[in-house]
Amino acid sequence: MKIILMGEPMGLFMANETGSLSEVNGFTASIAGAEYNVAVGLARLGHTPAYCTRLGFDPLGERILRGMRQNGIATDLVMQTEEALTGFMMKAFTQKGDPDIAYYRKGSAASTITPHDIDKLDLYGCERLHVTGIFPAVSESALAATKRLIQRAQALELPISFDPNLRPQLWASEKKMIATLNGLAQGVETFLPGIGEGRILTGRDTPEGVAEYYHSLGVKNVVVKTGKEGAYFSQLGGKAGYSPAFPVREKVDTVGAGDGFAAGVISALAEGETLEEATFRGNVIGAIQITHRSDNEGLPTREQLSKIILEGTA
């Protein structure tokens, strides 16, 4: 299935040793971005993700394009410009907990996308859309373009999934972040917040309360990630319940776990699985990803996923 993802893939420089990002000497180059991670996950499960973004005509842009093609991500919705550079990020090496990350994305090529650019895209053959709350925060232009792509997807009756992926530092205020993301959530098929994000966005403390809020906005499926407990799923007018976390032998790096979770849920729904089954798959892939340091290298193929499920531990 061809699934559109809109966002900003970035160059990633991972420190090779512990210490402050300003002091370490060696880095390994890779590719990052929440939507990119989801795209890699979908491709490894046999789907055809199509990335909608803009890159610079620069070495990082070329590296990202090459990475997309090597990972089975369609690039026909990728635009390029000579007027802005591709964004990048630096990630510290840590042996415990979440790593420090520094972003360099202000004024990036992706941030210059406009609704007019979206109107020119050929969406023929696309069957689903996945967006996050990161790209709308990058610039007013990116927000307008995201709204336009959602409108086009709705006109084509494509199911839309939305991971809020809160980045408060990118927004002018928390009030604007909440109002904007809740506005974008109206009418999507599947909403994928973490419980902490749900509390911020709705003011409600429980997964059930968060799900009820988004059902009131017309969202059909709500899946609330609850960390080490797993996830709560709720279908409007249908089944609701908890899916326990999948066991992990050793947690290495939590970055990318939520993106792996999203890839699991989206792929399963695209294949006609129930919301409960989709949530289980999301939990498994999220667990697999946190056993790897890279943001997406741990994402499994279908065969690897089946094997780990049979083993019962990531």
Image (cartoon, rainbow, N blue to C red):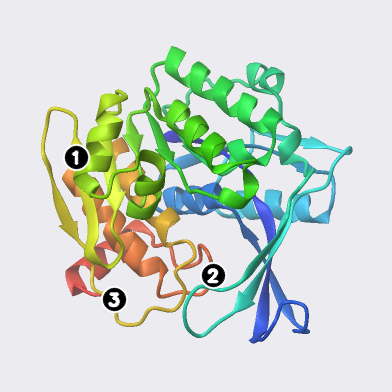
Judging from the image, what secondary structure is the residue with disc 3 in?
loop
Snapshot quadrant of residue 107: top right
Give the labeled residue for mark 1.
Answer: 234
What kind of residue is marked 1? Ser
112 or 288, which lies in front? 112
Residue 152 is labelled as none
The image shows residue 290 at horizontal and vertical percentages of 41, 70
Q: Quarter-wise, where is residue 281 in the image?
A: bottom left
Q: Which residue in the structure is indicated by mark 2?
A: 294
Going by the picture, which residue comes out furthest to the top? 155
Q: Nearer the viewer, residue 196 or 9?
A: 196
Q: Secondary structure at mark 1?
A: strand
Q: Dot 3 corresponds to which residue?
A: 248
Where does the C terminus fall, quadrant-wise? bottom left
Q: Would residue 103 be seen by someone viewing this image from the given angle? A: yes
Residue 147: give x, y in percent of width and height: 55, 24
Q: Residues within 10 Å of mark 2 (few under 14, many from 20)?
A: many
Image x and y of residue 33, in percent? 59, 53
Residue 278 lies left or right of residue 196; in this view the side is: left
